[in-house]
Each structure stands twice: as structure tokens, then as C-alpha cells.
Image (spheres, rainbow, N blue to C red):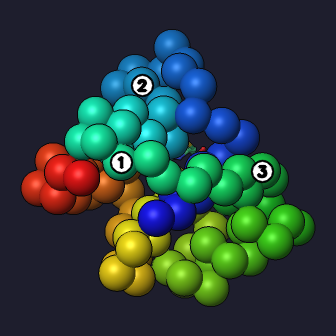
Amino acid sequence: MKLYVCWGTFHTPRPGGHPCGNAYDALREAGHDPEVIKAYGLAPLPDLTSGRREVKRLTGKSWVPVLVTDDGEIINESKSIAAWAEANPA
Ligand SMILES: N[C@@H](CCC(=O)N[C@@H](CS)C(=O)NCC(=O)O)C(=O)O
């Protein structure tokens, strides 16, 4: 599976945590080992990186995190990714 993130899966003091880090942690806690793809850039800016362009192609938007499961299912929104991980442990 592939997890598209912004600049990493680190934690930030942002209320609710860092969405990309939260999604990654949820997948790891469920026993998955996603390939992490850093999209870099910033969603409101033009899609300058191949990662951002791929995210846009997959979802129609430039926002991350985005999960592509081994079955090809595309899930965006960190909470939806966490819910998928809980429902689909490795
Ligand atoms: N509601 C979204 C928020 C996603 C979000 O805020 N993502 C951060 C990156 S972790 C961001 O800055 N997104 C803009 C971007 O992709 O550059 C979620 O929980 O997935």
C-alpha cells in the first residue's frame, strides 16, 4: 500500500495532531507497513511535484494524506484512513 503524505510522518503541536502522522501511526498500529511517498509542496499551490500531481490524479484534489490500498482503493482524510486501518488489520 502507498501512503501519500506532505513532508513526512512526524508529529506537530497542531491541535488534533499532524494528519499525515496520524494516518501513518494508525496504519502501523494495525500492522501495516505502508510505502510512504512524500508529496512535498503545499496543497493550495500549483502541483509542482510528481507526488502532488499523482494525488490530484487519484483524488481530484491536492490534499494529503491519501492512502492507496493493495486492492487499489483510494482513501483520503486522515480519519477515514485511520478507520480503514482499524477495520482492516494486517
Ligand atoms: N482534514 C484533512 C486535513 C489534511 C491536512 O490538513 N493535511 C495537511 C498535511 S498533514 C496539510 O497541510 N495539507 C495541505 C497539503 O497537503 O499541503 C485530514 O485530516 O486528512
Quadrant of residue 88 in the image?
A: bottom left
Q: Tag 3, which secondary structure?
A: loop
Residue indicated by mark 2: 17
Which residue is pictured at 35% across the width and 26% down the height?
Answer: 16
Q: Are marks 2 and 3 in contact (CB under 8 Å)?
A: no
Q: Tag 2, which secondary structure?
A: loop
Query: Camera-side residue: 71 or 56?
Result: 71
Disc on the earlier residue, 1 or 3: 1
For badge 3, the amino acid type reads: Tyr
Asked if residue 5 lies left or right of residue 48, the reply is left
State the CA–CA distance, disc 2 to disc 3.
18 Å
Residue indicated by mark 1: 32
Residue 28 x/y as whole percent: 36, 38
Residue 32 x/y as whole percent: 35, 48
Q: Looking at the picture, does residue 51 appear above or below residue 40?
A: below
Disc on the earlier residue, 2 or 1: 2
Which residue is pictured at 37% across the width and 57% down the height?
Answer: 77
State the CA–CA distance, disc 1 to disc 3.
23 Å
Asked if residue 43 lies left or right of residue 50, the reply is left
**Mark 3 surroundings within 10 Å by alpha-carbon count, few (fewer than 14), some (14 through 19), many (20 or more):** some
For badge 1, the amino acid type reads: His
Q: Is residue 27 visible?
A: yes
Residue 40 x/y as whole percent: 78, 50
Q: Residue furthest right?
A: 48
Q: Residue furthest left?
A: 87
Q: Tag 1, which secondary structure?
A: loop
Residue indicated by mark 3: 40
Q: Looking at the picture, does residue 76 appear above or below residue 14?
A: below
**Mark 2 surroundings within 10 Å by alpha-carbon count, few (fewer than 14), some (14 through 19), many (20 or more):** few
